[in-house]
Image (cartoon, coloured by chain):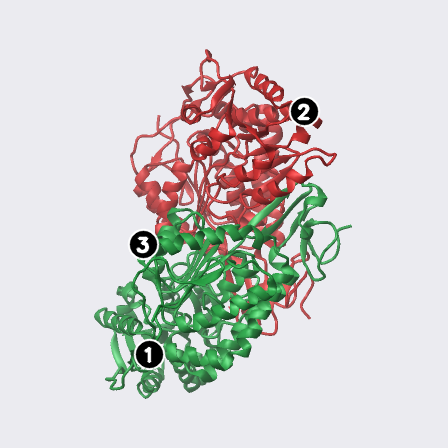
Chain colours: A green, B red
Amino acid sequence: MNPAPLWIGGSFRPSADGLPGFRAFNPETGRPISGEYPTSGLRDLDTFLDAASGVAPALAAAPAESIARFLEGYASRIESRAVALSGLAYEETALPVRPRLFEVELPRTLKQLREGARIARSRNWREPVIDTGANLRTLRGPLGKPVVIFSPNNFPFAFNALSGSDFVSACVAQNPVLAKAHPGHPHVTEALADLAQEALAAAGLPPGSIQLCYGLDETAGFALVGDRRVGAVCFTGSRTAGLALKAHADSAGIPFFGEFSSTNPVFILPGALAERGEALASEIATSCLMGSGQFCTKPGLLVLPACPGALAWLETLTGLFASAPPATLLAAGVRDRFEAALARWERAGARRLGGGGPVTQAGFRVSPALFGVDARTFLANPGELETEAFGPAALVVHDIDPREMPSLAARLEGQLTATLLSDHAGADEALYTPLASVLRTRAGRLLNDKMPTGVLVSPAMNHGGPFPATNQPGFTSVGLPGAIRRLTMLYCYDNVRPDRLPDELGNPNPVPGLWRLVDGNWISGDID
Amino acid sequence: MNPAPLWIGGSFRPSADGLPGFRAFNPETGRPISGEYPTSGLRDLDTFLDAASGVAPALAAAPAESIARFLEGYASRIESRAVALSGLAYEETALPVRPRLFEVELPRTLKQLREGARIARSRNWREPVIDTGANLRTLRGPLGKPVVIFSPNNFPFAFNALSGSDFVSACVAQNPVLAKAHPGHPHVTEALADLAQEALAAAGLPPGSIQLCYGLDETAGFALVGDRRVGAVCFTGSRTAGLALKAHADSAGIPFFGEFSSTNPVFILPGALAERGEALASEIATSCLMGSGQFCTKPGLLVLPACPGALAWLETLTGLFASAPPATLLAAGVRDRFEAALARWERAGARRLGGGGPVTQAGFRVSPALFGVDARTFLANPGELETEAFGPAALVVHDIDPREMPSLAARLEGQLTATLLSDHAGADEALYTPLASVLRTRAGRLLNDKMPTGVLVSPAMNHGGPFPATNQPGFTSVGLPGAIRRLTMLYCYDNVRPDRLPDELGNPNPVPGLWRLVDGNWISGDID
C-alpha cells in the first residue's frame, strides 16, 4: 500500500522524496496501526516553500471575511465529524474519548477556531495605532512568508498543527501554514486535512494556503526552519528537539516561538495544609495523573513545608499515587523518556515514596509514582531534579522551613506556571508575599488555590514563561489575540496618502468593535 | 593617568580586570582625545551581573512615581548641561553642534526621557488584560533580570546606551540596565553617567539599577550576552558584530533585539520625476548626505525608472553629490568600512557616477559619491550590491521599466524603511499599488513623498523591520510604549485573590488614563 499523500502545493500528492515512511502506534496495544505515512526530505521541502511563498501575497490580500468563513466552516466540519475524529484520536493516543477528547478537547478546539473567526472579522489582532498629527499610522500585518508549525504529541486537536492555537494564529494573521503533523497521530491529522481543504475551498481562499507533511528527516527539518523563505516557526515539544530546531532558525534570523518544558512548581503553605490538606492531596493527585500526566502544565514539583501534619499528608498523597491504575502513555519514546527522567531523579538523590510497580498489560503503560527529596538534597542538585518527567509522576521537595521557600523558588528554572496554596484565614499571608514576589518573574502564570492543568482560551491567558519554559517570555501561545501577535510584523505608514491606507488606518472606523489607539486613547469610533 | 572609572555595583570604581584601555578620537583631526577608558573582562562582568541580579527585585518593586521622577530629573540635568554635552559630543563625533546635536538630537533625547516618565506614571506600558468571568488577569512586568544595551556610534545622545530608546524602555519596565558605551563617545557617556547617578539618588532608586562599562574584550562580550542572569539584549550597530553577539544570546535562550543594517530603498516613479524632479534630487541628496550619511534610515538605494528625463535627472543628482564638501565620518573604522563597501559595489558592477575625489584634509574624511548600476546587473548580484555603505554615498539602480519595479523589490533584503515617490495627478497610481504591496512585507515603515531619515518619537512609529534590518519584525525600537514591550514579560494572575493583585489589575482603576482591556473592551474607568 502506498503511504498517505502529503497536502502540498494545493493538492493531495505523494511525497517526491521516496524516503521510508512510518506508522502510528496504538498505545493501548503497543502495536502499529495500519496505514503508512511519508517522511519528507529536501525535495518536498522545496515544493512546500515555493508554494507557500507563491500564495503569501494572495492570502495577505484576502478579505477578513474569507478568513473568518474558513475558520468557521472548518470548525463546523470538525464538529460534524466529532465522534469519528474522537475515535481516531483515541486509537492513536489512548486518551479517553469521554470526557477528554469528545467533551473537553474538541469543544475547546472549536471554541478557539471560532474565536479566531471572530477576531479576524473584528480585525482587533491588527492593533492599529494612529498619530493623526504626524500622519503616522501603524498596524500589524502578515509576515508575507509561511509559518512553520511543529505540534506536540499530547493534544491531537487543541494543539494540532492543523487545528491548534498556533494554526489559528497563523490563519488569522493571513500567513500561509506549513504544518508538521506529530508522528504520534497522523490519522487524526490526515482527517483534519481533508476537512481543512474543503473549508478552504468553500471560503474561496487560495489552495496552498495550508500545507501538511507528516515526517521530516533531520536534514530537511533543520533546512526548513533555517530557510529564509520562512517567516516564523512555532514549536511545542521536547527541549532537546526544540533547542536543536531553534538553533537553525536563530542562525537564519527567523523568529522562533518555542515551548520546551516546565515542572510547574506548587508551593503548599502550612495554613493550607492544616485547613484543607485532604482536599489538596486529592486535587493534586488528580491534576498530576489526568491525561496520564501528559500536560505541559502538570504540577510536577510539589514543595511541602516542614510543619505538623506534613508527613501524614505526604503518606496520603503517596497512597493516591500508589493506588492509581497503570497509565497509558502516548508512545514508546514517551514511556522511555519518562522512565529515564525518574531514574535521573533517583540518581540525584530522590526516593520513590510509592507507586511505580511492575506493569503486566501490553502497550505503553507505566505505574504512577510519587518521589520525594529533602530540600537540602534538592538545592544541591536542582538541575537534575528539575528534569521534567512527562507522565504520571511528581517530585515532592519536603522538609523545608516555609520561610526558606523563596530562596528555593529563586533557584528554579523558568516555568509556565507556579501555584501557591494558602489558607483562607490569613495564617499564610506573611509567607505568601515574599514567595509570590520571587515566583512572579519565574513563571508566566501564577495561580492561587487551584491546579495549573486547565489552560483557558481567554484574551487574559498567558501560556508562556521565561526560558526554558519558552524562549520569549513576552508572548503567550494560547489566548487570542495575544497568540496572533507572535506571527505578525508591524506595518508602519508614514505620510501615506489616505486612499492608499488599509481601511483599518483610515479616519472612518471600518468595523464596529475595532479598537484603535488614536493619539493616546483607545477608541472604537471614527477619527474626527 | 588612570583610566576613567566604571559605574558598577552602585558606585564609580576602577576596572578589576587590568586590561589595556582605549581612547576616543577626534574625527576632525584623527587624533586621540586625552583621557583613557577601561576595557572590561570577565571579572568586571561578574560584578556587573551580580549587582544587577541583586538589585532587580527592589527595582521591580519601586513605585512608578520614582521611575518617572528619575527620568524627569535626569532629563532636566541633561538639559541644564546641554551646551557642554553638545560640545563634548562634537569633539568625539564631529557631528555639528548646531543644528544637529544641540537643536535636534538633544531635544529629541529629552522628549523621549520625558515621554518615558509619562508612560511610567500612566502605567500604560503594562497593557492590562482582564477576563472578569474567569478571574484571569494579565499585565506586562519587569523581566526580573538586567537588560544589556549595546548602542551605536551615530547618535551620542538619542541612541546612547545611557539615554536612548533602549535605555528609556528598560527603565520604564523597571529592569536593571547594563549599558555598554560606544567606544566612539566615552566622554559624553561618562558625563551622562554622572547625571544619571545623581538623578537615580534623587529619585530614591537603588544604586546599582544602572551600570556602565566602556569596552568589553571579545570573551567578556560574548560571555555577557550568553549569561542566563541576563534578561534581554538590545543591540544597534554593524551586522557582523550584531550577529556574533546574537548567536551567543540565542544559544542561552536570551531574547535579543538587534538592528543590523538597511539600505532603505527609494522608488522614484515616472510621474514624480516629471512633476518635481529637481526638488526630489535636492531632497534625496540632502537626506543622503546629512550627518555625513550616517543614519540607519539613510536612503542608500535609489531606483530610477527608464523614462524621459531620467538621465538628465541622474546628472543633476550626481552634480549634487559631486559638489558636496568632504564629510567627516565617526571613526577610522567607519571610514574604512565605507570605502570597502564602495569597492564591493564596484566589483559587483556598479560605476562611480561622480564624487569621491581625493581628500587632503586631516581626520576621518571622505568625499560624497554617487554610484549607478543598471537593473540587469543589480538583479544578477543583489546581495553584493545591497551592502550598506554607512556614509555619504548612494547607489542608483537605473534603466528599469517601472512595471518591473515590484520584481526588483521582491529581491531585496528586509529593510527598516521603503519610500515611494509618486506624482499628485494620479499618473503613477497604477504603478504604485503593486509596488507598495510587495514592499509592505519587506520594510517596517513605508513612506510616501518624504525622506526616511526622520524617525519621529511617536506611539505610531515603527523603527524595525524584517531580517536583516532587525531579527524581530513584530517590534519597534523607537516609539513608546511599543519599544518597552520588548523588555517585558507577561505576568498572568489566575484566580489570585483581589488583595494580592497588582493595583493595575484590581477592579478599581488606580490611575486616571490607564487603559485596560476588560472583557474585550478598552476602558479607562473602574470595573463594575
Q: Is residue A43 visible?
A: yes
Chain letter of the residue carrying label 1: A
In the image, B515 versus B433, the foreground residue is B433
Q: Relative to B210, is B274 above or below? A: above
> Residue B273: x, y in percent?
66, 27
Residue beneath disc 1:
A27
Q: Which residue is mark 3?
A: A219
Amino acid of disc 1: Pro
Provide the chain ID for the residue under circle 2. Answer: B
Nearer the observer: mark 3 or 2; the answer is: 3
Q: Disc 2 marks which amino acid?
A: Ala
Packing grade of label 3 (10 A; few <14, some 14-19, many >=20) is few
Q: Residues within 10 Å of mark 1 (few under 14, many from 20)?
A: many
* Label 1 and label 3 in one chain: yes
Per the image, the residue denoted by label 2 is: B279
Same chain for the residues under marks 1 and 2 in the image = no
Badge 3 sits on which subunit?
A: A
